[in-house]
Amino acid sequence: MDAEAAVVGPLAEDLRVLNELSVVSEVDADAVGRAREHLEAARAILAEKTLDGPYGVRFTADGRQRSWGNAAVGLRNPIAPPLEFVKDDDGTVRADYFLRRGYEGPPGLTHGGISALILDQVLGYTATVNGCPGMTGTLTLRYRNPTPLGALHAEARVDRIEGIKAFVVGHISDGETVCVEAEGVFILPRWARERMAAEASAVTEAPAQD
Ligand SMILES: CCCCCCCCCCCC(=O)SCCNC(=O)CCNC(=O)[C@H](O)C(C)(C)COP(=O)(O)OP(=O)(O)OC[C@H]1O[C@@H](n2cnc3c(N)ncnc32)[C@H](O)[C@@H]1OP(=O)(O)O
């Protein structure tokens, strides 16, 4: 982990713990008030200097991509569980992750929208690392069994690629039972296609160099 990640990663992790405590803490009103005074002090410090817009995608000096603001994988984002992906030799992508009690939907279970967030990211990343990056055009989910909170597993593989479209399938399980199945169509957007075509034609038209 680089030096900046070592500073901001633990901040996001602290905030994930606070998010859960906001849901489950049973301290009295005075204690809540005291906690909020500390949080206000922290807010004021962190607000001293901020970006003007979203975090976006940034790159390290050696070219590694940082999506630290991303709501599913962002190192800096307390909303992200976060997910960390492993790619197998056959192109399958896997992620073991842990959902705290702040991700509850039905009582004691994972919110269905959170499962959608996770599958969108896992399937989209799978398309990207298998050579067909794209935006989610369609994401279809089948909630087969209730998804618990806690330790979960997601995985995805490319079913097929048709030109600019990747068809990706995946699921979430609790280690034994498949809870949610997903199919996604990921499409290289028109603006990206046009940019790539313009860059290719600029290379073709450039005068030869000695
Ligand atoms: C660089 C990338 C970064 C890659 C970044 C990787 C991150 C992945 C993880 C995060 C994923 C997200 O959350 S992405 C955020 C959620 N998704 C979005 O916001 C996407 C919003 N929608 C769009 O931007 C657009 O509608 C697109 C890109 C989906 C399609 O626009 P387009 O590129 O102009 O499409 P168009 O030329 O008309 O059609 C191209 C082909 O796709 C088909 N098609 C068009 N829309 C759809 C659709 N919704 N579902 C299925 N198929 C569709 C058409 O029939 C056509 O098929 P044919 O006639 O050629 O057969």
Image (spheres, rainbow, N blue to C red):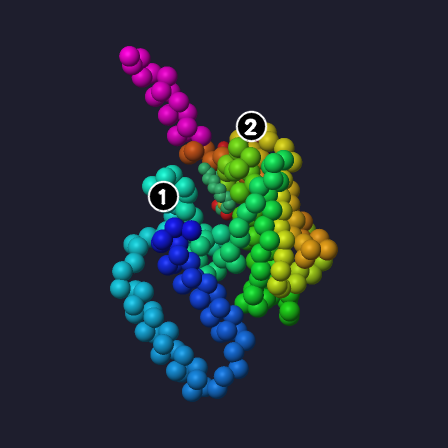
Q: Which element carries disc 1, helix, strand or loop?
A: loop
Q: Where is residue 46 in the image (x, y as percent from the top left)?
A: 32, 65
Label 2 vs label 1, nearer the camera: 1
Magenta extent: 193-210
Residue 156, located in which quarter of the rendered image?
A: top right
Extreme-left residue of the structure: 48
What kind of residue is marked 1?
Answer: Thr
Q: Position of residue 9 (x, y in %)?
A: 42, 58
Residue 190, located in which quarter of the rendered image?
A: top left
User: Which image quarter is the C terminus in?
Assistant: top left
Crowding at mark 2 (Cα within 10 Å: few <14, some 14-19, many 20+):
few
Q: Is residue 60 above or below residue 101?
A: above
In the displayed structure, does residue 49 sit left or right of residue 181? left
Q: Where is residue 137 in the image (x, y as percent from the top left)?
A: 54, 41
The foreground one among 21 and 144 is: 21
Q: Taking the image as drawn, is residue 51 in sight?
A: yes
Name the residue beneath numbered marker 2: 163
The foreground one among 12 and 172 is: 12
Name the residue beneath numbered marker 1: 60
Q: Is mark 2 within 8 Å of ligand 1?
A: yes
Q: Position of residue 7 (x, y in %)?
A: 37, 59
